[in-house]
Amino acid sequence: MMLEGHGVVKVAFHYLETAHQGWLAVRRKDHGICHVRSDEMTRRDEDGEPLYVPLLAMTLSDQPDYVFLVMGPEGGEPPLLWIRHFSYRGAVLPFRRVDIVGHEGRIGLRNLLRSSLCCTAQPWNSQGGVNEFLGDCNHLMGWEQFQLHEVAATEELQRLGEDMAAHFRMFPSADDLEQLIDTYEGSHLVWLLDAMMPVAAWSAVREVGQRLLERPSLREALLRQAGSSPWRDGWQCLARWLEDRESYPAAERGCPLGDDVLTWGQADAPAGFIHATLHAARASVKPRKRVCMMSTIRNEGIYVLEWIAYHRSIGVEHFFIYSNDNNDRSDLLLKALHDEGVITFIENPVQPGMSAQTKAYGHGLNVLPNILDYEWCFILDGDEFITLAPSYRTVGEYLQGFSRWESDAIALNWKFVASEVNRDGLADLVRPLTQRNRDIVSRGGIGEGWRLVKSAVRPGRAIQSRPHHPVWLQADRFTYRLSDGSIHSYRNPPPGIGADPAFADGGHYEDIYISHYYYKSIIEWVWKYARNSGLDGAMSFGVERYADYWANAFICQMNDPHEGQNENVLNRADGLLEEMVKLRSITAIAQAENIVRETWQERLLALLDMVEEADVASRLKEEWRYVLDPLAEERLGSIPLHQV
């Protein structure tokens, strides 16, 4: 208890029991909240540490309508609690309390940001006594009810409770939040601010973000208690960069393994007060340049130089490229390009199970400051090429015309480019991809895949990105348009798929689209499926990937009548080749590309031997086995090297 000006405030802590005799707990490895059976609560890891710790519900007698979910502080570091399908993350998660009539101490947890939603504990299955705790249930029945069991608080929890009783307030103003940061002398500043963020107006949070940017002493007072997190580092990187935009090394920090926290929880959920104010501050930065690109490159070293040269030839000014567990030695080429100032290369180590793409995009849109110097950022993969109508000399000209509409992001339709047989064997692999693959697959050849989009976004306006679309803060306005200027409303998704901004309701190709060189050739199709995608953790070779669906996908586009040649790319060959010559005239770049080519040839031939030894053809339907016939021709010869 503690005495306040208007009386005594009782602070209590409780365990939360589910309606089916389970408990809400926190996974210690990633601070995700889950539903755990009693016997599972005692499990420990190989070091003897508990896998789960009890989740606690804090209640304040002067705030009877609210419950605050916390975990016991460990070493003073603010945890990042998160719930699947829930719109907020933080050291404290506040909820509106719903008392269940006729059941003393039984409550429901209603979302403060989306009042129609509440939390639910998923039932266990036969595989174990742990399951998800979800934040998107639209009814309040048995699985959505929790019994409070009051527990004795540790000294640290008591201090946290006293601080909450003294400082928490509903609907704090920017002045309230600034004063708290300026004057608070305890050790729970992050907890207090995270508790108040969901009940503050976004305009107040945005204003505090601006004040933190303008007042170094205020920012330092906040960051002293921020613990170690990419968002704290993002604040420091942003402040340093704004002092000297030209000389600050963008890739200095990198994107270390610990940045996996960027992938936890719901993508559009701010990770507490520090993240929310950082996002607001980044959005206020005025860019000085027009166009950049961000990408993760996964074992595509043999195409990298063409991809960069092509986009330089149409006006892309800079590239932010993240490593993605490459084993084709393309990191050497990316580092050489970085050293020459052509790109910014950012180390992005991952472990099995980590999403390299999500981690990289979270870093680029929250931590990396230099990307804010560009008005627009295209987020594309290494086999995707911006394709402009002949009336536009550069992508900047298209964006200049597009500026007649207020927009934060542009959804770009794509076209798939058909495969070709590499008649000159391995030597064809170093012919420009955009010149050797010429025909466009019709919509019928790829099913609903033609409706997928890729995106350009104002980098200060997005909080994260999926492979196909940016993710934005729901509390803020965000205008997302199709390439013709109309609103991207995604109201008519493909059958069986919910409304998803990854899909457009129609196609617009008149001014701009993305050419997707997905298939290339059968030898490259074999290579593509020997590696994992950017959204998966590292995986080793497995013959099971070469199945009927793999053959059928290639055959469908191969036998497609096609809709014509990709003239809008083919006609830009001169600019592409000029840029490629410039880049390869730099000795270090040419040498690094040679290493990539040698590695590709060695590993590609070894892979083909494995495919033959595994008798992949026998795994396919007999009428589809012809898909492999060109392999004998395409593996002939060798990949040529530069003379340097």
Image (cartoon, grey):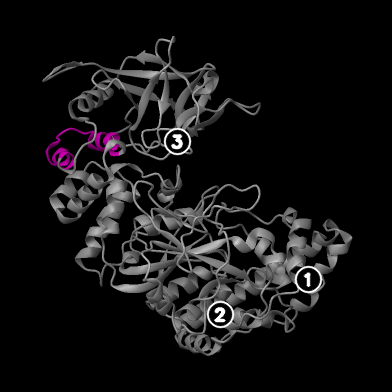
Q: Quadrant of residue 502?
A: bottom right
* Vertical arrangement, residue 118 with respect to residue 519, above or below: above
182 is within the stretch colored magenta:
yes
Residue matched to label 1: 559
Report if residue 227 is visible in the image.
Answer: yes
Amino acid type assigned to the residue bearing label 1 in the image: Asn
611 is within the stretch colored magenta:
no
* Vertical arrangement, residue 124 with respect to residue 406, above or below: above
Rendering coords of residue 576 (x, y %): 51, 85
Query: How many angstroms separate mark 1 from mark 2 (CA)?
Result: 35 Å
Q: Which mark is residue 83?
A: 3
Identify the element where label 2 is drawn.
helix
Residue matched to label 2: 594
Asked if marks 1 and 2 touch (Cβ < 8 Å), the reply is: no
Query: How many angstroms separate mark 2 from mark 3 (CA)?
Result: 47 Å
Q: Residues within 10 Å of mark 2 (few under 14, many from 20)?
A: many
Question: As drawn, is 129 to the left or to the right of 427?
Answer: left
Q: Earlier in the sequence, mark 3 or mark 1?
A: 3
